[in-house]
Image (cartoon, rainbow, N blue to C red):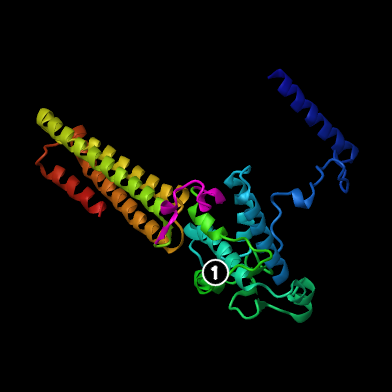
Amino acid sequence: MLLRCALRGLLGGLLVLSALLGQPLLAEGTDHWLPTAIAPDANPLRPPDTSSPRATIESLVLNLDRVYLIGKDPEQPGRETIRPLRRAVRTLDLSEVPRAFADSVGVEVALLLKEVIDRVGLPPYSSIPDAEQVERQALTQWRIPNTEILLQQVQEGPRAESWLFSTDTVDRAEDFFASVEDLPYLPQGSTPGIYRAYTLTPGTGIDFTWADNQALPPWLAREWLGQAVWQWLAAAVAVISAIVIALLAYQLARRAERRAKAQLGRETRWRTMAALVLALLLAVGVHALIGWQINFTGAMLQTIARIFVVIEYSLLAWLVAVVFSRIPEAIIRSRRLRSRGIDSQLLRLGFSTSSL
């Protein structure tokens, strides 16, 4: 404590002395005391280059090439693909995607666009406008030749002047992929099966051991409604287990409360509240498990997410209703009011109305 006070006094004395002498403690215009920036390529915060259509396409392709190399390497865990995946997603205009789905939709769209490019190809890079051509020709949009894949320059917002794959392209990426899915991969620069590997990999990232049938029997890797059989089985086990646990907890709570009512002569609902809290936590947990670990994708993920949102809010509303029903009873007991009296009835009516 004394040492801290002495250091504060010394610093204060130096500041006063520098003010009296008219010289700042750290002279303006000098930077020898600042930490030197690391190399741009080593900086994980450096955003992908989206200064032109050429730069944006290069950023998408090169980052997903890196994802492919990491995912194919058995020595590297799938989580190592997360960083280049996120950099690839930064080439997309996700401004019209709901925030709750932006991450998953972004990864899927980036991979789908790579699958399309791997089949139909790109024009020579020299023919794709760079930053100089954009400025000289005053371009605001550019379309990959012979496709409807559009890149646009963002005009406002935090990403103004960035060239991104347009919101229409993001919205139609799955249709583009469905149209070219039966075409063969081009011999150079392709990343075969990268989207399928993503859909089959549990958790985050991409690991090709799941897609190459090295981790699962072939029948479990077959797809139904856009998801692998193992994903449906895992989701079914999680949902059924959660329902069984929640119903069992609720039934036990109700039985315990009936016994308590017989003994005390009044109803207690805290056990029901605990059962509802458990059910809500189970719903949230299964929702997260299906989205993050079992890794449902596409429209099915969004459908399931909406179903779980309805379930979660319904359980929350039920819990709130039970809590509000017990508050007037607690007040009645604490004030020692008559249970059938007018004041007690008004309290119950007021809380019932406010909970609607």
Percent of width and height locating residue 126: 77, 74
Image check: 188 left or right of 349?
A: right
Where does label 1 land, which residue? 170
Q: Is residue 219 magenta?
A: yes
Residue at screen point 60% across, 50% down: 82
Query: Which residue is nearer to you in this view: 347 or 310?
Result: 310
- SS at mark 1 in the image: helix
Q: With 307 as the anchor, is 78 left or right in this view?
A: right
Q: Residue at x 39, y 62 (%)?
A: 225
- Where does the magenta region start and end? 203-224
Q: Is residue 53 above or below residue 47?
A: below
Q: Nearer the viewer, residue 234 or 15?
A: 234
Image quadrant in which the N terminus is located: top right
Q: Nearer the viewer, residue 244 or 176?
A: 176
Name the residue rendered at 18%, 38% in the picture: 254
x and y, in percent, of residue 148 in the image: 58, 78
Which amino acid type is shown beneath numbered disc 1?
A: Val
* x and y percentages locating residue 299 in the rendered image: 43, 64
Magenta stretch encompasses residue 34: no
How far from the left and from the top, in percent, is residue 48?
69, 59
